[in-house]
Structures are given as structure tokens and as C-alpha cells.
Amino acid sequence: MGDSKQDDSVAGEAGGSASDDFVLSAPVAEDGFRVHQLIRACPPLDENSIYCNLLQCDHFADTSVKVERQGELVAFISGYIPPATPDVLFIWQVAVAPSARGHGLGGRMLRYLVDCDACRAVRYMHTTVTPDNEASTAMFEGFARRHGAALSKDLLYHKDRHFGGQHESEIRFTIGPLR
């Protein structure tokens, strides 16, 4: 899809049609508050501060994507390329409004990011998923399958060691190579 700053109306790889009116594009700083509201409307996602969401939309705009339908923000992925691993795109959070579910937006956004200019050197996608998050597990497994990429899982952050028992363990998903 080329440059991540370019708006792109897409039919997508997992359903939908050219008439579904979803527009994928890179976020801008002014989207930070709307992203915060979207995440708040998508429990059980972890809410970050509005400032954190602002930084995601500003500092990480080239590796994040928003989806709008008729001007309404209906989906968002925050991602970044870790400095120590420039061939990895880490997907931080995926949010899809209840009204926009069932259109394959998660997979469409992941593809958008893998294809954007900022991710030209990316060969692997990493994310973390809690063991009980069936929707995210299915989305990432489906993405790997559709793209013929291997998917492996390992424990990255332990419930007790890293979260003081206050958060479920996070399992790292590694998808790739993507190219």
C-alpha cells in the first residue's frame, strides 16, 4: 500500500467490499484523544493515558494505523520498531469498535502496516497476547496463515514476576519471516 501517510480505501483481505467505506491511514497527533476514547470503548483493552495515546499518534504515526468510516474513528493499531531489532514490527495494541467488527479490519490494518514505507526492513511481527484473549489469538493466527508465515509463541512477561500478580501473563507471538 506504499506510503503509510497515504489514505487508502480498501476492500481488504478478510472480507468487506470496496463499498464498505473504511479508510486506512496513518494517525496524526490530533487523533490521540479519539484513540483514547476508542480504547476505552473496547474493554478489556488496557487504557493508557491520553498523553500516551497522543504520543502513539505522533511519535509512532509511521508504524501505526487508524481506520475511519464516514469521519468516525472505528479502529486503531499502535505499533513500533524496537531500536535493537530494526527488522521487527511490534504491535502494541489493536482496537476495533464494536460497530466495526466482523469486517476483517484487524488483518487489513496489519497488512497495511507491513506494506508501509516505514516497515520496508521488517521481516517479523511481534506482539503479546494474554492466554484468555481468543479474539487476538485468532486474528494473529489468521494473519500468519493467510500470509504463509510461521507463528511461534513463548512466554515473555510472567504474571507474578513482571506484573506483581496484577495482570495476566503475556505470551509473545512471533510471525515471520514476512518477506
Image (tube, helix red, strand yellow):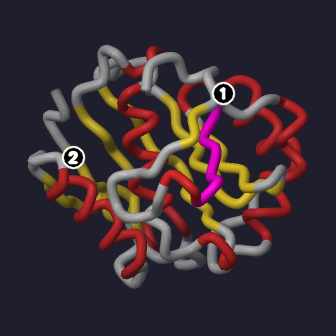
Given residues 112 and 154, the one toward you in this image is 112
Residue 82 lies, in percent from the top left, at 44, 26
Q: Give the image quarter of residue 130.
A: bottom left
Residue, x 21% and y 59% (percent of image)?
154
User: Is 10 left, or right, of 140 in this rendering?
Assistant: right
Outermost residue, front direction? 19
Numbered mark located on residue 79 in the image: none
Q: Which quadrant: the C terminus?
A: top left
Numbered mark located on residue 61 in the image: 1
Q: Which quadrant: the N terminus?
A: top left
Magenta extent: 20-25
Give the amino acid at mark 1.
Ala
Give the amino acid at mark 2.
Ile
Residue, x 45% and y 26% (percent of image)?
81
Given residues 124 and 38, the one toward you in this image is 38
Given residues 56 and 13, the one toward you in this image is 13
Residue, x 55% and y 57% (percent of image)?
94
User: Is 119 left, or right, of 4 in this rendering?
Assistant: left
* Cα gap from disc 1 to disc 2, whole angstroms: 22 Å
User: Is 136 left, or right, of 53 in this rendering?
Assistant: left
Q: Give the image quarter of residue 9.
A: top right
Judged by its main secondary structure, the magenta piece is: strand
Residue, x 85% and y 62% (percent of image)?
37
Residue 60 lies, in percent from the top left, at 64, 28
The residue carrying pointer 1 sits among few (fewer than 14), some (14 to 19) or many (20 or more) residues within 10 Å by Cα, namely many
Residue at image mark 2 = 175
Is residue 41 depicted above or below 82 in this figure? Answer: below
